[in-house]
Image: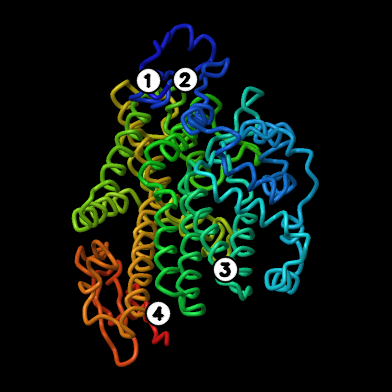
Amino acid sequence: MLSGCIPAQQDADQQAGKPKLTISQETTFVTEPLLANGYVDFAAAINTRLRKSVNSDNNACIPLYEAIGPSTVQIDMHDYLWGPKQVEAFFEEIGAPDLIYKKRSALDELRYSSLHEHFRVYEHPDSRFDDIFRLLHDAARRDRYYSPLITNGAGDGRPQILAGASYPSDIAMRCAADLLLTRAGAVSDSESAWKDILACYHLGRLVAMGPEVDDAILGMQIEQKSIAAALEFVKRFRPDAAKLRRCRTDLGSIPAPSNVSAKVDLAERCKCLDALLNLAYYGDPTTPNQGYPGAGRGLGEVYNELIRHGIGDPGWDPAFKEINKSYDEVVRILNLRKLDERRKALEELERKWQDTRESFTPPERGEFSSLDPWEATPEYREQMETLAWLQLQLAELTDPSDQTATVDATTEAAAMKLAGRAAAVMFQPSYVRARMAEERTRQAGRNLEIALALAEYYTAHATYPRQLEDLKPMFLAEIPADIFSDQLPVYRLLKDDCLFYSVGENQRDDDGIHDRAGADDLGVRMENIN
């Protein structure tokens, strides 16, 4: 359930060592199921929503993991994230418990072979991969993708936070996509090549159905590779009008793209709330195996700052409410339909984030280049800058040097609201980058639709049209607009070919150039295909 309210029962909860927190949609967003100690099981709540209408016949996850092999899950997730029980739970949850006993697949073995072997297999796959291709095409014919969130240790000691429920086997998914597209580029039969490209395109959309923004990013990367392969297919095979029409019909059967905003609204919001809930219940993580990657590490420091400022047993409601308020605003902005409105709102949001950052120098560690790999990332720098901001804000409320001072309820609530704001900011900047990637991917799909129509026009007239509008109505009922300009893509009829392009994120006509500094047009050049 993602709504409703469960009575706090504060007296009993405090006696049992539970934090001062009301379980409600306004605070924890998810209200059930609960673990024995009252801890909200966010992973189970999300999985319950995602598995609706999913069964063993329509879940593409099953043939995909049969293709890549269960050992991939075991190796990718590492013992400190997933133990044997979690791997078993994963396959049980997707409806294929027997897969745990499947031997290592040829694709799984390929992941750990040499680069030379990769290219050899990709270009000339042997009979070991016949079953792999069959399973990948089986997955592509399905219309659902349920890859559950599984955390380590739930119900047994301190739960691993949801942010540590890493996506299993993303490397293998990329390997599977590369295998399909490389075979498509190597075969001489256009029908077989197109089937592999279409299967890969379909798989990209399916993988993007996963709950997290990382799932969407992986799916978009596979989709973009498939679009590039489809454009190359047109140049290489020069299909006739009938084949081009079938290609466009095939693309229309691919599942609709997932929305980044929907993933932010549910799974990503819950990851932030769950990380804070873990701190509320158990305090600062003191062992490296609790799954505090990414922004979760910064939250541990937020907790320490609260303790340092004399806020050791706070009421957590203000922090959780502030997180939900922040996520509501982010989701609202990501869902704005007009690009200019969304860009303006995102710029304002970026300014708000900048307002929660202060200059940060790693103590006794020198410059960022000398830090550990994770600590040298921009994400870590931003988290520590937000922590520096929180330190300054808390210093205005309380005096950490006065160990005898008590914190009144008003000051405590203000401090917890600041902590909630800091927590949300630590998690959120990546969502904006994912939303921009979503726009680019969708524009690439529109470009492919136009390219196929232009190729069909060429087969009928032995030349390209003078303008894109000439494709209507025989080749396209409507010309897909440029997502970034809300106008038709720029179109130029050249001597022997044509060029069309989107103006890209900078909303500036860069003459179809993408690889020059600052130039980000997304274009396609259609060659003379006689």
Q: Quadrant of residue 438?
A: bottom left
Q: Measured from the top left, where is residue 341 in percent x and y?
A: 19, 54
Split into 4 quadrants, where in the image is the C terminus? bottom left
Q: Is residue 475 left or right of residue 301?
A: left
In the picture of the structure, the residue carrying the numbered disc 4 is 515
Q: Measured from the top left, where is residue 205 in percent x and y?
A: 47, 52
| Element class at badge 2 | loop
The circle on residue 127 is: none
Q: Is residue 479 left or right of residue 383?
A: left
In the picture of the structure, the residue carrying the numbered disc 2 is 32
Compared to 196, does 215 lie above or below? above
Amino acid found under the numbered disc labelled 2: Glu
Number of marks present in the image shown: 4
Q: Is residue 17 visible?
A: yes
* First-in-chain label (2 vs 1): 1
Amino acid found under the numbered disc labelled 4: Asp
Kindly report which numbered mark, 2 or 1, lies closer to the viewer in this rendering: 2
| Element class at badge 3 | helix
In the picture of the structure, the residue carrying the numbered disc 1 is 24
Q: Residues within 10 Å of mark 2 (few under 14, many from 20)?
A: many
Amino acid found under the numbered disc labelled 1: Ser
Disc 2/disc 1 C-alpha distance (Å): 9 Å
- Do the CB atoms of the residues marked 2 and 1 lie less than 8 Å apart? no
Kindly report which numbered mark, 4 or 1, lies closer to the viewer in this rendering: 4
In the picture of the structure, the residue carrying the numbered disc 3 is 193
- Do the CB atoms of the residues marked 4 and 2 lie less than 8 Å apart? no
- Do the CB atoms of the residues marked 2 and 3 lie less than 8 Å apart? no
